[in-house]
Amino acid sequence: MSANMGASTPKLGNRIMMSLLEAPVVGGVLGKGLTILTFTGRKTGRTYRTPVGYKRTGVDTITLQSKFGTDGKTWWRNFTGDGAHVTVLVDGTTHPGHAVAVKDGEIVTVTITLTNEGESR
């Protein structure tokens, strides 16, 4: 059974982008600034996967920052307060981490601290 079974990916564009990111050759090129973020919904308990832009801000730190806005994307709300466990695909390797979101006006910054070396996909 695939690790992705049961994960919610509601939009066709997201599914296409994730397939490209997971492809051996194309993923290496696209993956320089994009990752696949996997997390569990705080209210639903469902597993979600979404492609997001990222910036490596330290050896064990990844930052996602955007004007997600209060009327736009809401997935980042799963990481408010104490945050939550996530996995991210970086350089062809899946890394577990802990994500915390901080909202400042319309800017939301999600900081992910990687918790170990991860495993190859």
Image (cartoon, helix red, strand yellow):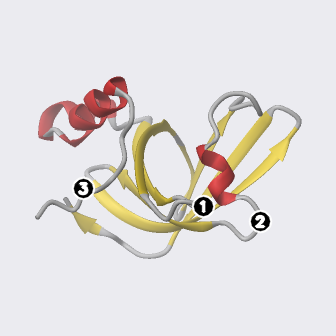
Residue at point 36%, 31% (across, down): 14
In percent of the image, x 34 and y 23: which residue is there? 13
Residue 13's disc number: none
Q: Residue type at mark 3?
A: Asn
Q: Position of residue 81 (x, y in %)?
A: 77, 65
Label 2 sits on what residue type?
Answer: Gly
Tell me if mark 1 has few (under 14), some (14-19) or many (20+) residues whose alpha carbon lies within 10 angstroms of its own: few
Residue 19 quadrant = top left
In the rendering, at what x and y percent does residue 62 appear?
56, 53
Residue assigned mark 3: 4
Name the residue beneath numbered marker 1.
43
Judged from this view, the residue extending furthest toward the top is: 13
Give the residue displayed 31% in from the left and 49% down from the top.
91
In what element is the residue under mark 1?
A: loop
Q: SS class of the residue under badge 2?
A: loop
Q: Which mark is residue 81?
A: 2
What separation in Å lies between label 1 and label 2 (alpha carbons)? Answer: 14 Å
Image quadrant in which you'd find residue 84: bottom right
Compared with 68, 79 (above or below) is below
Question: Which is more N-terminal, label 3 or label 1?
Answer: 3
In the rendered structure, the answer to whether residue 93 lies left or right of residue 87 reads: left
Earlier in the chain: of badge 1 and badge 2, it is 1
In the rendered image, which quarter contains the C terminus? bottom left
**C-alpha span from label 3 to label 2:** 27 Å
Rendering coords of residue 102 (x, y %): 78, 52
* Disc with the residue nearer the chain's start (3 vs 2): 3
Q: Residue furthest bottom?
A: 116
Residue count near mark 2 (Cα–Cα under 10 Å), binned few <14, some 14–19, many ≥20:
few
In the figure, residue 27 lies in which quadrant? top left
Give the alpha-carbon distance from disc 1 to disc 3, as whole Å. Answer: 20 Å
The answer to whether the residue labelled 1 contacts the one labelled 3, judged by CB atoms less than 8 Å apart, is no
> What quarter of the picture does the N terminus occupy?
bottom left
